[in-house]
Image (cartoon, helix red, strand yellow):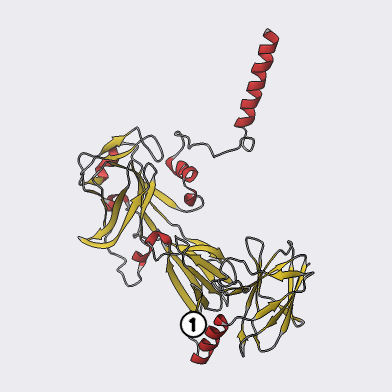
Amino acid sequence: MRIKRLAALKSWIIIAMMLAVPGCAHGPPPAPRLGQPIGVQLMQTEAMFVGAPFRVLLDFESADDLAFITGCPSAHLDPSLAHTGKSSLQLPANIGHFSVRLPRLLDQGPFPGSWTLLGGYFLSREPAAVGISYEVDGQTVLRRNVNLSPRNWTPVMLDIAALNDPNRSAEAPVGLLRFTLPRQTVWCDDLLVMDNTHFLVGDADQAGDNWTVCQRGFTTIIDRPGSFKLSIPTVETGPGGRQVEESNALRVVMTSMDCQHTWAIYHDGTEYVDGKFKSAVALPAAQTAQMVQQQDHPAELSVPEELGRVERNSPGDLNNDGYAELTGAYQVKASGPRIQITITPQTPKLAKPVVEISGLPPGRIVAALDGQLIDQTVRLGNGHVLIQISSTIQRPVNLDVRVQ
């Protein structure tokens, strides 16, 4: 009996050791360890901090942090709740607001410098909203309201990238950060600044005819030097904001938070806003009319049955004709490593059509239009292949695509 007990104990020890080895255990990542620095805990708790510069201004681990808070003498450290570390700042009901003395915390170089976001994390037990504003010399410069998700730590941040206006004096004083609070008790933790600049396409040093897609603060910046530049608010700014669903060398697709609106932008400036043609670059009236006409009367596509089919049920295809009006792309599905598509215009001219192909296996894409190679091809994250034909078509043509 004693031998069986020892064997069972040994088995449990082995299982415990396996679960302790990274990669052996399955499930959610472990909770942050309290003994680790707050910055490390933030990266373990919030993915957006991984690889991004940030600086924690107040972590409310020490009563000394209260010296930087004004307007709420009843606020105190609460060891029962924390976003990171072992405590947070409890703000009792009916306080109304509190402020943070930023000049005493940001004494290293000009503000905002490279920082793009400023704020902290808040928690409430019931639905509530917190207002955040940045004031300079008594004047409100930035302001927004954020709804808190009950019993979840919610980031309440300001986009401060706009404060880097070249027309603004470099010697402008650092202002005051103010939070407007709901009537009920809320908790605050991890007041910080960060630089969330992230390039989705290209990089800061990219030059030439290519474009870059960059998220900075609460803005997505799409820039093709010498051609066009778009600054599009993200969903954090409210109902008019857009979130990036797809980004690559040919196209960016953005949607609203409720997924009811779609905005597709191509590298040549062609846009489709909820299925309607627009252009980020100025076009002659005749060319604009042509693009509107071909959007309303898309070309007919045909595919040999043994090679695939025209896809008539793809997202964004509003009338099941094989053309996704929302993204401005014809939709086909291959049944193997090669597909041939006949494109027959239904308008006098068909300018720069885009074809999206699903079903092709992984590998190098070779595409040709009536024997002429096409170099504008992209493999999307979902495996689809996106091809843009740069020429204008006035007669039926054959697009041949194969995987090498």
Q: Which residue is mark 1?
A: 281
Q: Taking the image as drawn, is residue 198 in sight? A: yes
Residue at left offset 49%, top offset 36%: 31
Q: Is residue 204 left or right of residue 382?
A: left
As drawn, is 175 to the left or to the right of 328?
left
User: Residue at point 46% right, 53% down?
Assistant: 53
Examine the image and state in which quarter residue 16 appears. top right
Amino acid residing under circle 1: Val
Q: Secondary structure at mark 1?
A: loop
Residue 250's spot in the image, x, y percent?
59, 72
User: Which one is nearer the viewer's eye here, 61 or 166?
Assistant: 61
Between 184 and 140, which is closer to the camera in this rendering? 184
Farthest-out residue, front: 319
- Locate residue 46 relative to residue 172 in the image: left or right: right
Residue 50: give x, y in percent of width and height: 50, 50
Identified at 20% across, 47% down, the residue is 71
